[in-house]
Image (cartoon, rainbow, N blue to C red):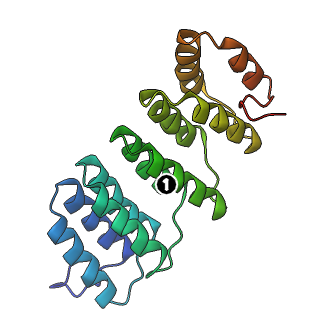
C-alpha cells in the first residue's frame, strides 16, 4: 500500500491490529497502533476491543485491563458493552469475580447498558464461588436494569437454585420481583 502511495485508513490499521493480536504478536500489534497514531488516526472502540479480546483469550488479564484503562483515560474512547463483557467474562473465568463485579458497577456508573451476557458471566462466576447472596443481589439488579434473562441465564439459575433448594427465588425473579435477602 505504502509503495503504491495508498495511505492506510482506520479499517486497515484495525484489521492489522486485530490480526497480530489474534496471532499473539502483541509487540507488532502495539507497533501498528503507534503507527496509526503517528499517521494522525484516532483509535476506536474496535481498535482497543481487538487488543483487549486477544489479551483475554491468552489469559493476560493485567494487560487487558491496562489497555482498558488507557482507552478510558488517555484516548478518551468510551468502552462499550462488548468490551465490558469481554473483561467481565474473562475475570469471572479466572476467579476474579470481585474485580468483575467492580467493573460491572463501573459500567452502570458510565451508563453502559449491560445485557444478558454480562449477567450470565457474573452469575456463572458467582456460582463457581458459591456466592448465593451476591447472586440474589445481581438478580435484583438485572430486574432493575430491565434486562430480560435469556435461556443461558435460566439454565444457570435453574440448575444452581434447584441444587440449593431455592426455586421460590427463581420464580419471583422470573415474575419481576426482588429476591435478595436484604428486601424489607
Residue 175 falls in which quadrant of the image? top right
Q: x, y percentage for residue 21?
A: 23, 60
Q: Secondary structure at mark 1?
A: helix
**Relative side of 48 to 116, left or right:** left
Above or below, 85 against 151 in this view is below
Above or below, 78 against 115 in this view is below
Residue 141 falls in which quadrant of the image? top right
Q: x, y percentage for residue 4?
A: 19, 84
Above or below, 130 against 91 in this view is above
Q: x, y percentage for residue 23?
A: 17, 54
Which residue: 66% across, 12% down?
167
Residue sitting nearer the eye, 132 or 13 = 132
Quadrant containing the C terminus is: top right
**Relative side of 170 to 79, left or right:** right
Quadrant containing the N terminus is: bottom left
- Which residue corresponds to mark 1? 84
Q: x, y percentage for residue 65?
A: 37, 62
**Mark 1 Cα within 10 Å, few/some/many (few <14, many 20+)?**
many
Which residue: 68% across, 19% down?
170
Residue lying at the far right of the rendered structure: 184
**Relative side of 160 to 112, left or right:** left
How many dots with numbers? 1
Residue sitting nearer the eye, 57 or 170 = 170
Which residue: 42% across, 81% down?
42
Amino acid at each position: 500500500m505504502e509503495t503504491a502511495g495508498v495511505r492506510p485508513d482506520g479499517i486497515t490499521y484495525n484489521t492489522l491490529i486485530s490480526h497480530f493480536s489474534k496471532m499473539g504478536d502483541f509487540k507488532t500489534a502495539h507497533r501498528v497502533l503507534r503507527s496509526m497514531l503517528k499517521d494522525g488516526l484516532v483509535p476506536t472502540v474496535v481498535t482497543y476491543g481487538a487488543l483487549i479480546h486477544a489479551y483475554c483469550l491468552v489469559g493476560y488479564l493485567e494487560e487487558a485491563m491496562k489497555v482498558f484503562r488507557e482507552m478510558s483515560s488517555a484516548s478518551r474512547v468510551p468502552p462499550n458493552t462488548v468490551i465490558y463483557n469481554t473483561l467481565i467474562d474473562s475475570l469471572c473465568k479466572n476467579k476474579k469475580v470481585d474485580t468483575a463485579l467492580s467493573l460491572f458497577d463501573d459500567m452502570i456508573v458510565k451508563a453502559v447498558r449491560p445485557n444478558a451476557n454480562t449477567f450470565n458471566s457474573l452469575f456463572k462466576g458467582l456460582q463457581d464461588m458459591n456466592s448465593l447472596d451476591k447472586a440474589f443481589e445481581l438478580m435484583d439488579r438485572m430486574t432493575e436494569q430491565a434486562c430480560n434473562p435469556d435461556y443461558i441465564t435460566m439454565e444457570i439459575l435453574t440448575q444452581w437454585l434447584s441444587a440449593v433448594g431455592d426455586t421460590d427465588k427463581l420464580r419471583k425473579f422470573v415474575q419481576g420481583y426482588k429476591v435478595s435477602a436484604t428486601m424489607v
